[in-house]
């Protein structure tokens, strides 16, 4: 193998590259840190930023008051992030320095976990300003998460990716039922949650309706974990539309897990096919466990939905983890048949750390933690996994590009290359881990560098559509480095589009 020897030159070259805007000129003020009159700080509905949100008391006159500094007198947008799980509008009167600005509508968002933004332009004085949002009806205000003052700089890349993808594909030509489309559409769902553009949700619905009939029938046996990931789309549609057919279709996946085959210690096989018997792939945890946790939270909770997602993570982690904090791609339980890639000396794993497999695992841990309750008995175990993964991510980050290599542990191999989808996944996982306090805040710099590195792989073509490049195609398991190095890198592959949207919505939400 050849070794990279020009690290200094590479770093210097990086400094010459144009860097898309990765930070924003806006300032975020968390509601829980503001002055609160007749309201309480809570954290029982997921999706908030900071450490919580303000739940207004149900009465006229309850308010949250922010102190905002401005370097000069200016008129600037005030953007309120909120959730309103009712169908009734909860308008609030906005005042700036005691002067009424206007009454702003805070309509229903569909659920207390569905967060939206509304904006109003306001004149600010140089120096300190007082901005107050006061409830005007007996229902009080919405749950208020944060106030952003100023205009974000740079393009809205999430909207650009969604608009470009919708222009390239109709719901009928987007592709068949499978995890890559489910991943992408979940990302589009997050963009819809932020923007409220009805076209985005309708597109998702039109795609799903190709597979789910009016009675909730779906023609799929769900004999591999990959086939289950798009169940998240069904859950989102059930949550947003209330149509029982999506719940019925999702229940088929949930019920399939009752009899789905496992290893001797309870891990779900990656697939029931003869070539996958007794195998655990790190990819698989993202394909099924967040779905099962959401099913319990949004449809029907029971002991199975409460215990299995985190349990599966522990089983997989016990077999795949390696001493440097990273994971191997896959494990095959000893016994016949034995996969060709098995390395008994490395715990019956394949002995290679493929970047996206580890990215799937980190995102699954984050997503499950967002759903399970604070007193869940396995919650700390999931946090401990992230406390191993995040430092390992940081240690293996390429200092020249901010991204991560296709084979994470081989940065010095000239055949290796930085891969975009896993870089987005690692950035997302680090950022959310910092936000939730799972890891030290110093790791935010790694998320910021990762974000900048991913954005360098995003561009706008001559047709005005957004492109993302250097995304690895779908990948099997192997024990040969060249197999991973030689994977094709199709532009706008859905692995990358979906991972990008999930990451970008996180970075926009936290204003990094």
Image (spheres, helix red, strand yellow):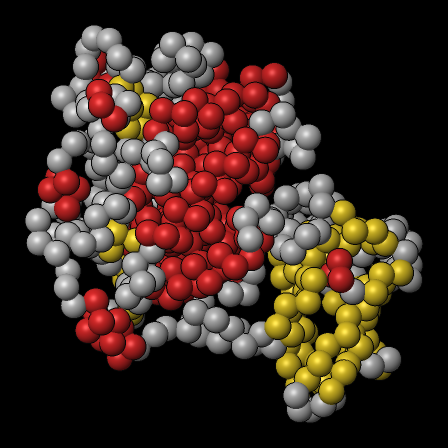
Residue 58 in sight: yes
Note whether 382 is above or below 195 in the view shown: above
Where residue 512 appears, x then y in whole percent? 51, 65
- In the image: residue 92, left or right of residue 195: right
- In the image: residue 444, left or right of residue 393: right
Where residue 107 appears, x then y in whole percent? 71, 55
Tell me which corner region of the image, top left, top right, bottom left or bottom right, holds residue 274. Answer: top left
Pick the residue in front: 508 or 208: 508
Q: How many marks?
A: 0
- In the image: residue 339, left or right of residue 64: left
Pick the residue in front: 18 or 209: 18
Where residue 148 appears, x then y in whole percent? 64, 69
The residue lying furthest to the left in this view is 1
Identify the residue shown where x is 36% and y is 24%. 319
Residue 170 in sight: no
Where residue 307 appears, x then y in whole percent? 56, 21
Identify the residue shown where x is 12% and y is 52%. 415
Tell me which corner region of the image, top left, top right, bottom left or bottom right, holds residue 177. Answer: top left
Identify the residue shown where x is 64% and y is 28%. 376
Identify the residue shown where x is 22% and y is 71%. 8
Note whether 198 is above or below 179 in the view shown: below
């Amino acid at each position: 193998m050849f070794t990279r020897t020009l690290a200094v030159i590479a770093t210097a070259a990086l400094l010459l590259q144009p860097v898309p805007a990765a930070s924003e000129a806006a300032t975020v003020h968390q509601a829980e840190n503001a002055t609160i009159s007749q309201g309480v700080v809570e954290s029982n509905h997921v999706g908030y930023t900071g450490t919580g949100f303000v739940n207004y008391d149900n009465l006229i006159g309850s308010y949250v008051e922010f102190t905002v500094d401005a370097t000069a007198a200016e008129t600037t947008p005030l953007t309120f992030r909120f959730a309103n799980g009712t169908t009734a509008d909860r308008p609030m009167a906005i005042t700036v320095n005691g002067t009424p600005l206007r009454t702003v509508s805070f309509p229903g968002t569909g659920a207390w976990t569905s967060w939206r933004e509304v904006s109003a332009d306001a004149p600010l004085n140089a120096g300190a300003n007082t901005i107050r949002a006061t409830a005007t009806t007996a229902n009080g205000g919405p749950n208020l998460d944060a106030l952003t003052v100023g205009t974000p700089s740079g393009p809205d890349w999430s909207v650009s990716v969604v608009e470009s993808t919708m222009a390239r594909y109709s719901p009928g030509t987007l592709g068949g039922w499978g995890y890559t489309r489910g991943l992408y559409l979940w990302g589009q769902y997050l963009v819809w949650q932020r923007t409220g553009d009805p076209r985005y949700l309708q597109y998702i619905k039109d795609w799903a309706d190709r597979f789910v009939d009016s009675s909730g029938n779906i023609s799929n046996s769900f004999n591999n974990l990959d086939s289950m990931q798009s169940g998240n789309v069904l859950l989102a549609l059930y949550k947003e539309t209330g149509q029982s057919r999506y719940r019925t279709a999702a229940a088929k996946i949930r019920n399939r897990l009752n009899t789905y085959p496992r290893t001797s210690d309870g891990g779900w096989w990656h697939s029931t096919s003869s070539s996958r018997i007794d195998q655990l792939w790190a990819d698989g945890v993202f394909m099924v466990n967040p779905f099962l946790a959401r099913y319990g939270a949004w449809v029907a909770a029971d002991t199975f939905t409460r215990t299995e997602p985190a349990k599966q993570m522990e089983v997989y982690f016990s077999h795949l983890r390696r001493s440097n904090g990273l994971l191997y791609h896959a494990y095959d339980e000893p016994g016949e048949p034995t996969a060709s890639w098995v390395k008994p000396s490395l715990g019956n794993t394949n002995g290679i750390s493929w970047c996206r497999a580890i990215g799937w695992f980190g995102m699954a841990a984050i997503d499950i933690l967002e759903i399970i309750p604070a007193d869940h008995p396995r919650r700390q175990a999931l946090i401990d996994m992230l406390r191993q993964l995040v430092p390992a991510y940081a240690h293996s980050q390429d200092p020249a590009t901010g991204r991560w290599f296709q084979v994470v542990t081989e940065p010095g191999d000239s055949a290796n290359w930085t891969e975009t989808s896993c870089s987005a996944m690692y950035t997302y996982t680090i950022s959310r881990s910092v936000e939730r306090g799972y890891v030290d805040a110093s790791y935010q710099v790694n998320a910021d560098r990762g974000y900048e590195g991913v954005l360098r792989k995003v561009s706008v073509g001559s047709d005005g559509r957004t492109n993302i490049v250097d995304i690895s195609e779908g990948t099997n398991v192997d024990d040969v480095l060249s197999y991973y190095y030689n994977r094709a890198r199709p532009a706008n592959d859905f692995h990358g589009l979906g991972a990008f949207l999930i990451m970008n919505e996180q970075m926009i939400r936290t204003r990094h």
